């Protein structure tokens, strides 16, 4: 099933507008709008606050600082940030353990949404007043992944979203459909786009198939929601029964506690009557063997989690016998993000936001992620 089939399955009446919302993200009409006086550049220099990664990097060392709000240069926009959220990688970047050696950003966070308040020279993609979010790889606009997209990475090699006013590359921006709120959009750039890429571009999920989504965090929860919306049956695993109960309320069909059931993969295969068709492997190599045990013949495992190397190398049970497909992915393209937003608008899908913090309490928000007490996303509301 391609992404348009997903929209058709999910909401036949809204498919046209959803596709339009997606493709309208960066269209000719926007280029025309960008040429209007709405794009006036601010003349007075104002001051605004940003959180900066500390030295040495650690959550406690995050620094709230005030700076003269920068003006956007060629190809850049200035955004008034409305909301941001935290992905596992953002916590790793702030704490200095992920990804080793590539972090050059001073301002963290790869997920956010806001309003364009100024545009630099040559920007035709968006105009002042547009509601936007951004891909964290701004150079991956469409097509297949290539290694060079790692070079510009919002929140990692480029400054990110955790400020009242931030500069972003115009090329990575995606306009929000009216039906998608700033807060919903702010949760998607990393976890939502990755789940979309895995389910619809890689696994080509079809209605009636069964998806296993590991854990109850950001990627897992939006992955479950998107798979349910597309007509799939979804199995979720967690270390905690209270989280599993909440995931059932949110739509999970079957749940397994991986702490109580060490052979949880085999259990999933039993519960599903022969195994799952798609695995969102949101942990990584430590859980790969059990994920393979959970698979039906011909299943697709999408490697998303960057969990640590296990003590023993994975034995990969059933890899050949069941003809499994194993595919790693790194986030997704701007086109995938536009498609995701279009589908969310058409289906009125709301991401699960478990905890919300004020901008001034960003350190507490990172600590919440560290405690892993959340389901879905941890949100930061900006002033
Ligand atoms: N490849 C990519 O492009 C990409 C994009 C986004 C994120 N990621 C990676 O994906 C992973 C998840 O990110 P996130 O932001 O969703 O993190 P998160 O919100 O912190 O959630 C992490 C979840 O992992 C679950 N977990 C930990 N060990 C587990 C196990 N043995 N079995 C099942 N679940 C387990 C926990 O579930 P319970 O608390 O319920 O036990 C927790 O909810 C991270 O490794 C992140 O770096 C990769």
Image (cartoon, rainbow, N blue to C red):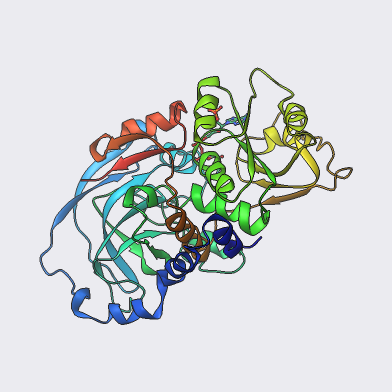
Extreme-left residue of the structure? 44
Name above or below for residue 204 compared with residue 319: below
Name above or below for residue 72 compared with residue 341: below
In which quadrant of the rendered image does the N terminus lie?
Answer: bottom right
Extreme-top residue of the structure? 260
| Residue 119 image offset from top left, x and y in percent | 27, 71
Quadrant of res 377: top left
Left/right placement of residue 41 relative to residue 15 reads: left
Left/right placement of residue 290 relative to residue 59 reads: right
- Is residue 216 visible in the rendered image? The answer is yes
Extreme-front residue of the structure? 13
| Residue 69 image offset from top left, x and y in percent | 20, 58
| Residue 54 image offset from top left, x and y in percent | 34, 40
Extreme-right residue of the structure? 321
| Residue 185 image offset from top left, x and y in percent | 38, 52
Name above or below for residue 36 compared with residue 20: below
- Is residue 54 visible in the rendered image? The answer is no
Left/right placement of residue 190 relative to residue 236 reads: left
Q: Residue at the spot x=46%, y=66% of the render?
A: 22
Q: How many marks?
A: 0
Quadrant of res 261: top right
Q: Nearer the viewer, residue 69 or 212?
A: 212
Quadrant of res 202: bottom right
Q: Nearer the viewer, residue 321 or 61?
A: 321
Q: Residue at the spot x=80%, y=47% of the render?
A: 324
Q: Residue at the spot x=50%, y=50% of the render?
A: 192
Q: Residue at the spot x=23%, y=50% of the render?
A: 164
Q: Quadrant of ligand 1?
A: top right
In which quadrant of the rendered image does the C terminus lie?
Answer: top left
């Amino acid at each position: 099933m391609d992404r348009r089939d997903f929209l058709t399955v999910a909401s036949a009446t809204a498919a046209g507008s959803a596709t339009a919302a997606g493709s309208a993200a960066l269209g000719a009409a926007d280029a025309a709008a960008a040429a209007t006086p709405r794009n006036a550049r601010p003349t007075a220099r104002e001051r605004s606050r940003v959180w900066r990664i500390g030295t040495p990097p650690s959550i406690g060392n995050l620094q709230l600082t005030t700076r003269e709000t920068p003006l956007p240069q060629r190809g850049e926009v200035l955004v008034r940030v409305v909301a941001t959220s935290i992905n596992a990688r953002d916590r790793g970047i702030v704490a200095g353990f992920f990804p080793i050696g590539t972090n050059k950003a001073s301002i963290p966070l790869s997920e956010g949404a806001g309003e364009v308040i100024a545009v630099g020279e040559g920007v035709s993609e968006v105009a002042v007043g547009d509601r936007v979010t951004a891909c964290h790889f701004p150079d991956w606009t469409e097509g297949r992944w290539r290694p060079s997209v790692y070079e510009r990475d919002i929140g990692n090699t480029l400054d990110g979203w955790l400020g009242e006013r931030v500069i972003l590359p115009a090329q990575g921006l995606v306009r929000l459909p009216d039906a998608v709120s700033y807060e919903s959009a702010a949760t998607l750039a990393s976890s939502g786009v990755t789940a979309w890429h895995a389910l619809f571009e890689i696994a080509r999920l079809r209605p009636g198939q069964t998806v296993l989504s590991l854990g109850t965090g950001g990627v897992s929860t939006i992955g479950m929601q998107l798979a349910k919306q597309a007509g799939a049956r979804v199995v979720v695993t967690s270390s905690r029964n209270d989280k599993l109960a909440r995931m059932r309320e949110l739509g999970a069909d079957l749940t397994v506690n991986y702490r109580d059931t060490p052979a949880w993969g085999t259990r999933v295969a039993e519960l599903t009557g022969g195994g799952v068709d798609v695995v969102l492997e949101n942990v990584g190599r430590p859980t790969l063997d059990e994920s393979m045990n959970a698979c039906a013949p011909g299943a697709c495992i999408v490697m998303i989690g960057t969990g640590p190397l296990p003590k023993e190398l994975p034995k990969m049970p059933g890899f050949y016998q069941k003809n499994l497909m194993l595919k790693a992915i790194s986030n997704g393209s701007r086109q995938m993000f536009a498609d995701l937003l279009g589908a969310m608008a058409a289906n009125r899908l709301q991401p699960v936001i478990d905890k919300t913090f004020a901008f001034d309490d960003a350190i507490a928000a990172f600590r919440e992620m560290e405690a892993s007490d959340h389901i879905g996303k941890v949100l930061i509301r900006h002033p």
